[in-house]
Image (tube, rainbow, N blue to C red):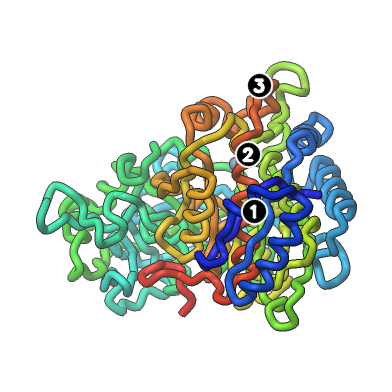
Amino acid sequence: MYLLGNPVFLGNKMCQNEGFLLTIAPPMKLLLSTALLAFCASQPQAAALPKVDSAMLLEQIGTLASDEFEGRAPGTRGEEQTVEYLQQQFKKLGLEPGNPDGTYLQAVPLVGISSHPTLSYGDKQLKFGDDYVAWTARPQPTVEISNSELVFVGYGVQAPEFKWDDYKGADLKGKTLVMLINDPPLPDPRRPHQLDASVFGGSAVTWYGRWNYKFEIAARLGAAAALIVHETKAAGYPYEVVVNGWGRENFALNSKTPEPYLPAMAGWLQQDRACELFKAAGLDFKELKQRAAARDFKPVPLGIKLNLSAVNATREVTSHNVVARIAGSDPQLKNEVVVYSAHWDHFGIDETLPGPRTQQIFHGAVDNASGVAALLQIAQAYKALPAAPKRTILFVATTAEERGLLGAQHYVRHPLYPIAKTILNINIDGMNLWGRARDVELSGMGKSTADEIVTALAAKQGRVVKPNSNGSYYRGDQLEFARAGVPTIYLRSSSAKALNYMTHQYHTVNDVVQANWNTAGAVEDISLLFQAGYQAAQAKEAPKWKPGAEFQRH
Ligand SMILES: [Zn+2]
């Protein structure tokens, strides 16, 4: 049995009777809670708290983060081990195959592209790396953009909810857009030295401020290429991060159709080189930047043509999402789906690192062996329910998150169940293994009514939900579900120890299983995530985007 002593009731206050239930013996509680559920049939129903098996959780993390799994890089022996292990675990738990073809797998075709670009305008040739980075998602030997007109489009934002449009209907087909990073900074009319919190999230970076949005809209407008001017403060990271991130092999979904999220070439311009480009056009970067921070800004053609091309080396890799499901029990609602996701992949092995083999392996114990183990625990909790939830629950262990959320991206582009009927994504990335934490950081808080489920459940645990302010919402698999229009839940416990992990171990070979881990916090979060999905699966109404949320289905 996976029932702890205290079933938690949600929804109608009339149906909340925990105090009473707590005073009786466990077997009776089950009967009574069933009776109460029948009584409150029209209300979001209660789910008993799962008994999370801490020993098993640690064992699963230990297995996934072992030397044998070789750092779980997509397309390697590490993938084979991981995918095999996850299939076995889902089978053992008694979950059905998640793919309607009767398997636990969804193939994800990837392509690694190493580009050698050249960029010039007029008689000026820029140096790849020092001056700019550029890449392509097109798996072809060469990509060539010649004589493409350069147009400065300010922040490159089209946000009807803020009555903002930097493009003003300009025809940008085949052109190269030069854009600023971050959101347009609008001062608060009452406190001019502060940003207006009612537009573009105030000081927090919104979707419109992020590079992936800017490249996506450039592609949507038919631009041939887009170059973002790198400014350290506005980007939040130095230029070296850009070079390290995009200056080597980049991965994309391997598809015959052009990547809809990227123009043929995308890149960043080093700030001084951008200033020189504007100067060559007889313009002043600072002055243009100021002009871009107003609603009446219009695209500014630079009167300069750009040549940008890339010679590419490609390698194809087939990777896999591992999928399992619990079919819904309601004849109607079973066609709707709650998707739990957690990425199984990590960075593999770096043989250039010094020391023995084990020190060359990126074990990714917290990131994200822990999240995958949590996914398995949640699957087990659902399986232990006396009856399956009304809606279908799908568990997706995604691949290639670390390569740019590609497993999740492939899933939403080729969903196994209609995306329009997918009511919620709960993504799990990195569990709290440092003891109980009072604070729950909810990414993307304020965007959908799913927040309310989390806030109520956390309160029952005596915890406080706070918005995450470091933009993590836009850096995990939940983003791909949100972009496809699905409301999401992605949370993390916040504590000094979690911060210490982020500073010293995250994305390094030091992210390994630690002897001093304390699973109390992870257990609480697993309970919360299980309950949240269960409540959504039972509720009359699916979670909805709030007005002004940027990912609303139109
Ligand atoms: Zn990671």
Circle nearer the viewer, 2 or 1: 1
Residue 377 point in image, percent of width and height: 74, 47
- For badge 1, the amino acid type reads Leu
Q: Is residue 530 left or right of residue 453?
A: right
Look at 22% across and 60% down and name the residue there: 292
Q: Nearer the viewer, residue 301 or 293?
A: 293
Of the residues tagged 1 and 3, which is closer to the observer?
A: 1
Residue sitting nearer the eye, 212 or 206: 206
**Are there few (<14), some (14-19), or many (20+) residues within 10 Å of tag 2?**
many
Whether label 2 lies within 8 Å of ligand 1 gets the answer no
Closer to the chain start, of discs 2 and 1, is: 1
Q: Which residue does the numbered mark 3 point to in the structure image?
A: 516
Q: Residues within 10 Å of mark 3 (few under 14, many from 20)?
A: few
Q: Is mark 3 within 8 Å of ligand 1?
A: no
SS of the residue under disc 3: loop
Q: Which labelled disc corresponds to residue 21? A: 1
Q: Furthest residue to the bottom?
A: 332
Q: Residue at x 58, y 76 (%)?
A: 540
Query: Circle 2 sits in a helix, a strand or a loop, which is it?
Result: helix
Q: Which mark is residue 522?
A: 2
Which type of secondary structure does the marked residue at label 1 adopt? Answer: helix
Question: Mark 3 or mark 2, which is nearer the start of the sequence?
Answer: 3
Question: In this image, 490 relative to 359: left or right?
Answer: left
Q: Quadrant of residue 290?
A: bottom left
Label whose residue precedes the other's in the sequence (1 or 3): 1
Whether residue 313 appears in this view of the structure is no
In the image, residue 343 lies at what x, y percent?
67, 49
